[in-house]
Amino acid sequence: VVCCLKLLLLLALGGLTMHVPDADVLAPLGLGALRLDGHLSYHDVAAVARDFGNRCSMLPSAVLHPGSVSDVAAAVRRVFQLGERSPLTVAARGHGHSLLGQSQTAGGIVVKMESLGGSGGGGAKMRVVHAGDGGSRAAAPYVDAPGGELWINVLHETLKHGLAPRSWTDYLHLTVGGTLSNAGVSGQAFRHGPQISNVNQLEIVTGRGDVVTCSPEENSDLFYGALGGLGQFGIITRARIALEPAPKMVRWIRVLYSDFTSFTEDQEALISAEKTFDYIEGFVTINRTGILNNWRTSFKPQDPVQASHFQSDGRVLYCLEMTKNFNDDEADIMEQEVGVLLSRLRYIQSTLFHTDVTYLEFLDRVHSSEVKLRAQGLWEVPHPWLNLLIPRSTIHKFASEVFGKILKDSNNGPILLYPVNRSKWDNRTSVVIPDEEIFYLVGFLSSAPSLSGHGSVEHAVNLNNKIVDFCDEAGLGMKQYLAPYTTQQQWKAHFGGARWETFERRKHMYDPLAILAPGQRIFPKGS
Ligand code: FAD
């Protein structure tokens, strides 16, 4: 109701008449008359007024289900033609897995990007090109994927060709355009960089409604701007993603540490070594008993008797997680290589666990947790997540203050902690990272299933604020990933002088009326 009233007021200020409800809202603006391959709908506005964070709801006026890239361009162009006095904005929505309304718009148009993908019925198909196909430009294999395609579908399609993307997120039910607008980070990033370092070309609908193809060679300013660009410069309708031969199997290993220094030194040695694992991440557990028993039952301890005597006793423990890829005929070599790598690590010897799974099972691992949580009604609860990037030089100071002091337990969700190297991130993209060669991704992935007490949003947000305040006061050089800032002042500080100037220049160039991705709250329309 508040959103509708706000829209009425805004339209009145813009000198436009409006008839409520539904389709009539957009008819006078010429949007209802657009000739589309897909369609605009009004009955499902509530469904896109929410996201994974479950803490913010903005009602749009309509949902565009594009049947083609031209539909997206036509809608944005029409909104652009309405000029700056019109309050209408356009929010591309991937899978709606944002945390605080980033893919929403109050009173504007939500573009349901999944409709554009093959699975959404929009007809845009994925195209896999093998190495050597199409002349010298295809020296390495790639896939052309619609911007609204889920990564799990990209994986299924490329596996049919024995290929797969090189860099991932931990969870694959996210869209190509959604993660490329942030960065896309997981345990492969130390080797291949984030997902935004593995894109050859993009097709983008700008904030003027133009369809532009861009790459490092062509329209490179838009290409780099859009990667990590929080949806500010255009809607990604297609991405050309680099591929590599896909392994069949994965040896998936976990070991525990009680000493933070040994844990991080081992992680850093592994990500810096020439011969190493294919995936490296880490987790922190605080004051949780029986954590060995809570691990996936398929994880086999190397020494079950010793492992059964292991007592976590509520301590702070650090879990190093690694994988080694292999094909059926390479099991022996894999065993040898893993043995050599593990022999250099200083984990608690009784806590070596491993399991062998297919590559698909490993990459899609978080989905099985989703299924279990959904069954218990625990997936669609609020998620007050906090994701930080902490320089190597301050990670110890961070850990000694946060783990066990600010945070007394980790019962509300996993805490990720693993290093990546800056040289694998392209400085020309829009993403903001710490100014040091090695930095850590630290993710506090809290759920808030109750209305009060330890499981509440209020409790989690309070702890998040304490952590962020500590980082700022101690001058740790921290940057937030998936940052939930709400004012331009905060965004300016996040980007810092020169980077902010570039970001602002690109906004004026590609989306001068600030139509796109208003939910990021960086450039309010009409300001
Ligand atoms: P949405 O949330 O729908 O959109 C995100 C932003 O991008 C919005 O501003 C939207 O307007 C804009 N946008 C969407 N599509 C497009 C497009 N085609 N073109 C331009 N702009 C667009 N991130 C990681 O990096 N690593 C992880 O391991 C990881 N794991 C996750 C696990 C879970 C369970 C969840 C919920 C999220 C995880 N994320 C991770 C975060 C994820 O990258 C973000 O949620 C991201 O927003 C992608 O979600 P989405 O595709 O649903 O995009």
Image: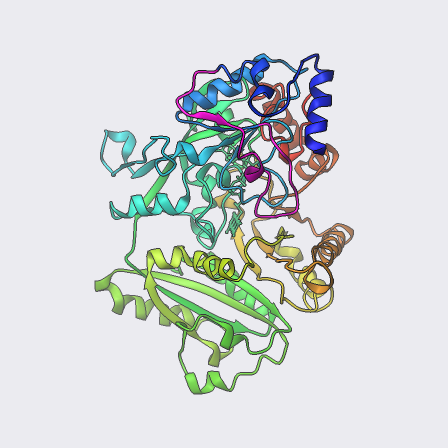
Query: Where's the N terminus, which quadrant?
Result: top right
Q: Main secondary structure of the magenta part?
A: loop
Q: Position of residue 109 (x, y in %)?
A: 56, 27
Q: Which residues are magenta?
A: 34-61
Residue 527 appears in the rendering: no
- Horizontal side of 341 relative to 138 (left or right) equals right
Res 118 visible: yes
**Residue positioned most to the right:** 473
* Residue 28 horizontal side relative to residue 113, left or right: right
483 or 13, nearer to the observer: 13
Q: Could you say where residue 385 lies in the image, as x and y percent from the top left?
A: 62, 52
Place of residue 116 in the rendered image (x, y in percent of width and height, measured from the top left): 40, 31
Q: Closer to the camera, 203 or 43?
A: 43
Say if the magenta span includes residue 53: yes
Q: How many marks?
A: 0
Q: Is residue 365 above or below residue 525?
A: below
Q: Residue at x 22, y 35 (%)?
A: 132
In the rendered image, the vertical position of residue 433 relative to residue 112, given as above or below: below
Q: Is residue 110 left or right of residue 409?
A: left
Q: Nearer the viewer, residue 175 or 180?
A: 175
Question: Which residue is rendered at x = 39% and y = 22% of the image?
Answer: 37
Q: Is residue 338 magenta?
A: no
